[in-house]
Amino acid sequence: MSFIQLSLTLILIGVAAGIVSTVGGLASLVSYPALLALGLPPVTANVTNTAGLIFTGVGASLASRKELKHQKRELITLLPLTLIGCIVGALLLFKIPAETFQKIVPFFILSAGILILLPRHLQVGQPAKWQVSLAWLGVFLVGIYSGYFGAASGVLMLSLLSVISQAPFQEYNATKNLTMGLANCIATLVYALQTTIIGALSCPLESAF
């Protein structure tokens, strides 16, 4: 496959993944298997995929600036928890053997697919304190997961924020967009310090997401 053909293929993959992301936040369910089909090793495909998601997070955050104005207080706690977890997860990607990653990722993808099919219930009433505390722990764990693999991490974060936040859906969805966008940026930075990110593959994805 020539460079031009590869670039066009990646752009098409990015467009398809972007559509899925808009509908359900599961871009990785399209882009990651497609990168594997192109012959990339599992860890390289994961790194390339995460790097390709950066512009999606930037665009979603910029579009949510109005809603984010009311979320500063929650972001003070949410961002450090998520981003520290993300760094841990990104480092684990290179500490855990690639063979292990290859074996467990199909279960992540299957779980993510099932998760998006489940009905989402908005939080009704005031949650108990233990529920909120558990949700904050979940935020840290989602941060780890987003740094390690991340498919459907946005959906998971949205579910947690429905418990933590008393704001309208539009506002905590904006919080999710910013948080997961920054998590992708941090994960990509950690990846870049650990391995080589193939820009010729991630850039076409970025242009289409």
Image: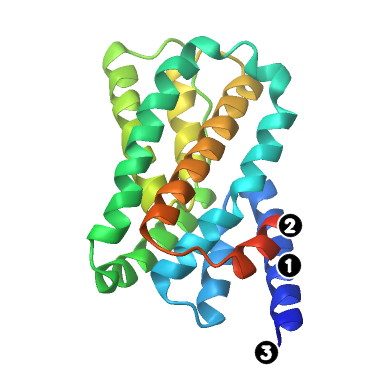
**Numbered disc 1: secondary structure:** helix
Identity, as a three-letter code, of the amino acid under mark 3: Met
Which label was assigned to residue 11? Answer: 1
Earlier along the polypeptide chain: callout 2 or callout 1? 1
Residue 18 point in image, percent of width and height: 69, 55
Q: Which residue is mark 2?
A: 207
How far apart, in angstroms, are the residues tagged by discs 2 and 3? 20 Å
Q: Is residue 104 left or right of residue 119?
A: left
Label 3 Cα neighbours within 10 Å, binned few <14 / some 14-19 / many ≥20: few
The residue drawn where x is 68% and y is 36% is 60
Identity, as a three-letter code, of the amino acid under mark 2: Ser
Q: Is residue 148 left or right of residue 178?
A: left
Residue 142 point in image, percent of width and height: 37, 39
In the image, 10 versus 194, the foreground residue is: 194
Q: Which residue is mark 3?
A: 1
Label 1 Cα neighbours within 10 Å, binned few <14 / some 14-19 / many ≥20: many
Q: Is residue 159 left or right of residue 38?
A: left
